[in-house]
Image (cartoon, helix red, strand yellow):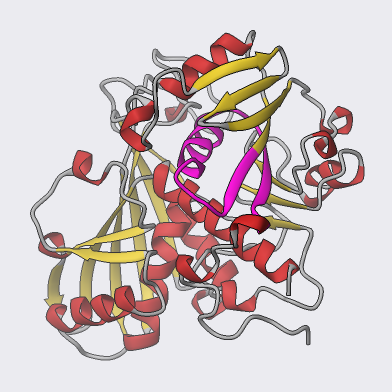
Amino acid sequence: MPATLDRGESLLPSEIMAAPAEIIKVGINGWGRIGRVAFRNSLSREDICIVAINHTCASIADIIHQILFDSTHGPLSRSVDVKPNAVFAVNENTLSVCGKLVHLTSERDPKFLDWTVSGAEYIIESTGKFTTTSLANLHIEHAGAKRVLISAPSKDAPTFVYGVNTSQYPISNPPSIVSCASCTTNCLAPLAKTLNEKFGIVQALMTTVHASTRSQPVLDGYSKRDRRAGRAVLGNVIPTTTGAAKAVSTVLPELSGKMTGISLRVPTNNVSLVDLTINLEHETSLVEILSQLEVASMGSLKGVLTVEHSELVSCDFQGNPHSCVVDAKACVELNPKFFKILAWYDNEWAYSSRLLDMLAMMAKVDRL
């Protein structure tokens, strides 16, 4: 059995920060929502530097505009302290962002990329297209990358949810390609892990009330996914499928067959909610459940899970870096074994935070 990290070793972001001389050089393939938010998120970190972006924009001016302005997260100055003219073009293939150089390419096929030009060793694969090991491996085999982190569920890549099963990440022969699962799984998994360890989950149903995504049409159109997914995102609550609940069993095998769920797409542009209905093995109370979640938030899941006691709404969680924010005031108890637990998550900012944490952990292992 390959050696793995000690239990809990990978869970605290403060423990994975590399020294300035060991900055982790990262490339982004895919300049969509996750790619852009991960880039903005990285600017406030000292351990990670995005040195390359592979995009499909028409011009370098378009990329500069997208870095500076965002309809969801506001101007760049809202996320990081920036000086005037902090983002500018050095030449047609290079940007300067807050004093850091970023190499730009525009290739749709990873076989034609060369990450070595920028020195990028770790790649965030965020196009949503190269999600299998064979496709993601193009970054390694042809483009010179060292490791690839897929920002989506994968059918065959090892899956790690930061803080949940990262202690199982092998240090003797780490995988070259890893999936970080989905934003919803990143919210659900730490919650399910804690509840199962403390009280035992007999069965559970999950509904994610999910903000709209780029794949949804503004007006009625067509979707290969299902008929309802092709309906207009504006003015509709759209029931659809999600693999997030079943995916939890990938990182928590003990929950295999015990959990499933659906998604409700709602016409907001960010922040989603996990609604988890659970039947527990051991009798307890809502007060005790919240107490145990508080303990986890200060221990092994610090920075990943937290408990909020104020009466807030979705926009209040925008920019919150936690994967799972339990809404203490919204949770309910029917009897000592039957509960409904609600947890918020910024499906862009929190998820990109975990991507960066995962990259930092992978680099830490490589330097052992």
In this rendered view, identify the residue nearer to me: 272 or 349. Answer: 349
In this rendered view, identify the residue nearer to me: 332 or 258. Answer: 332
Residue at coordinates 35% horizontally, 49% vertically from top-left?
208
In this rendered view, identify the residue nearer to me: 295 or 68. Answer: 68
Is the residue 65 above or below the residue 132 in the image? above
Q: Position of residue 28 (x, y in %)?
A: 65, 37
Q: Quadrant of residue 6?
A: bottom right
Q: Quadrant of the N terminus?
A: bottom right
Residue 57: in magenta span: no
Left or right of residue 257: residue 107: right
Residue at coordinates 32% horizontally, 26% vertically from top-left?
74
Q: Quadrant of residue 194?
A: bottom left
Residue at coordinates 15% horizontally, 44% vertically from top-left?
313
Left or right of residue 171: residue 83: left
Q: Quadrant of the C terminus?
A: bottom right
Left or right of residue 6: residue 44: left
Is the residue 258 above or below the residue 90 in the image? below
Q: Position of residue 181 (x, y in %)?
A: 56, 55
First to last magenta residue range: 22-50
Residue found at the far bottom of this picture: 282
Q: Judge whether residue 202 can be spotted in this image.
A: no
Q: Position of residue 300 (x, y in %)?
A: 41, 78
In this rendered view, identify the residue nearer to me: 312 or 248. Answer: 312
